[in-house]
Structures are given as structure tokens and as C-alpha cells.
């Protein structure tokens, strides 16, 4: 009897992690193109993160990290800090290789988010284009050049909690009439490898 009680939450956990990524995408208006591109971005991120190595996760140090003596300078890459929202992430992932074999995984992926010129991170639309705190999400693979993943990104944030990563991405688009469309995704990913 005790065994069956223990099994229920475990089963529920498995079901929730296999929920399709698309289910976590929400749209505030008709913007199928925007939704589709976010879906593609999130699907790739989820795959890469699932096949990632938890021990490889690192983030750029912020002022708090220097104060807490986790880093000697702001911007230095340090091991991921748990339970605090961060905007950049570097990790190695087995995705695209033999995804379950941690030993063969080598590719380093670095996601970083930069505010547009004219925007500051203050919850306001500083440059008057209707989008709030928008910026560009970039990806560097194996130390290569920065590739643009998406522009008009109003939020790219994640929190690490053990092997779980809670991600938030919100993308905004402005049509020719100046209307703003937003889509967001908030997947939780469980990293396979330690
Ligand atoms: Ca703006
Ligand atoms: Ca702003």
C-alpha cells in the first residue's frame, strides 16, 4: 500500500515532463507566425537542455555573485547558481550526437541575451516601439560566432533547481499598424546527465 502511494507522484512527474512543448506556448493574440518561430526555438532548447550535462551549466556572474565571492568579476562564467533567475547559460550537450551517452558529448552551447540599444532592463518601453525590455537572444556553438536565435525577445530567463530547469521566453512582434503581438513559453526541463 505504501509503495502504491509513492508511485503516484512519480508517475505524475513523468507525465508532466513528456507533455508536448507546444502545450506550454501561450498567445495573447492572433500571431501564428510568431508562435511557430517560438515553438521551433523552444523545441530546440528543450532538446539540447534535456541532453545537457548538469555539471557543465554555467552562467555569467552578476554583482551578487561577486559579493557572495562566487566570482571575482561581473561577467565571468561561473557554475550555475540555483534558484535565482539568470539570462545566460553555457553548457555541454549530447544533443545531435548519441544523446544518451554522456561520455561522447562535446558540443558547448552558449545562450546569451542582450538588450537592444535604447532599452534598459526596467519593465518599461524606453525606446517607444511598444516592446518592453526587448533584446536579442544569441547562440554560440563550440565557441564559434554569435548566431541570432531571435530578436524582439522581451524575456529570456531560467532558473536551475537540481536537474530541473524552468525556462521563460517571451517574444514580441510589431505589425505594420504598430500592434504588438506577444507569445511566451514556460517549459520545465529535466536534464538527463549529471
Ligand atoms: Ca522598446
Ligand atoms: Ca526597458
Image: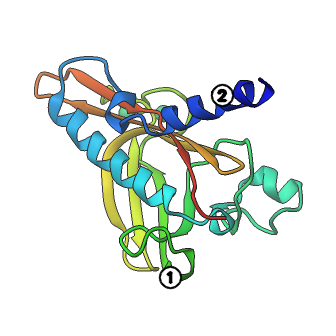
Where is residue 17 drawn, in percent x and y? 50, 38
In the image, is residue 3 above or below residue 161?
A: above
**Residue marked by disc 1:** 104
Residue 175, quarter of the rendered image: top left
SS for tag 1? helix
SS for tag 2? helix
Q: Mark 1 CB in 8 Å range of ligand 2?
A: no
Does residue 95 appear anywhere in the picture?
Answer: yes
Which part of the image, by quadrant, shows the N terminus?
A: top right
Give the mark nearest the N terminus, 1 or 2.
2
Does residue 131 appear anywhere in the picture?
Answer: no
Query: Rounded to the nearest whole Å, what is the CA distance between mark 1 and mark 2?
Result: 33 Å
Where is residue 92 drawn, in percent x and y? 54, 71
**Residue marked by disc 2:** 9
Q: Nearer the viewer, residue 128 or 61?
A: 61
Q: Is residue 20 left or right of residue 73?
A: left
Q: Is residue 91 left or right of residue 60?
A: left
Residue 184, quarter of the rendered image: top left
The residue under the point 72% across, 49% down is 162
Q: Which mark is residue 123?
A: none
The residue under the point 44% across, 60% down is 48
The residue under the point 49% across, 66% down is 110
Amino acid at each position: 500500500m505504501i509503495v502504491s502511494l509513492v508511485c503516484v507522484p512519480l508517475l505524475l512527474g513523468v507525465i508532466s515532463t513528456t507533455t508536448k512543448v507546444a502545450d506550454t506556448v501561450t498567445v495573447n493574440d492572433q500571431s501564428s507566425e510568431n508562435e511557430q518561430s517560438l515553438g521551433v526555438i523552444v523545441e530546440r532548447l528543450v532538446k539540447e537542455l534535456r541532453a545537457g550535462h548538469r555539471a557543465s551549466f554555467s552562467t555569467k556572474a552578476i554583482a551578487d555573485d561577486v559579493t557572495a565571492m562566487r566570482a571575482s568579476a561581473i561577467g565571468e562564467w561561473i557554475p550555475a547558481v540555483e534558484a535565482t533567475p539568470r539570462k545566460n547559460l553555457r553548457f555541454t550537450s549530447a544533443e545531435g550526437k548519441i544523446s544518451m551517452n554522456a561520455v561522447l558529448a562535446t558540443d558547448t552551447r552558449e545562450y546569451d541575451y542582450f538588450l537592444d540599444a535604447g532599452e534598459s532592463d526596467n519593465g518599461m518601453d524606453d525606446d517607444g516601439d511598444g516592446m518592453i525590455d526587448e533584446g536579442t537572444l544569441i547562440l554560440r556553438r563550440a565557441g564559434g560566432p554569435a548566431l541570432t536565435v531571435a530578436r524582439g525577445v522581451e524575456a529570456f530567463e531560467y532558473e536551475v533547481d537540481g536537474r530541473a530547469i524552468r525556462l521563460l521566453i517571451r517574444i514580441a512582434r510589431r505589425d505594420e499598424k504598430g500592434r504588438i503581438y506577444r507569445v511566451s513559453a514556460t517549459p520545465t526541463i529535466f536534464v538527463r546527465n549529471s
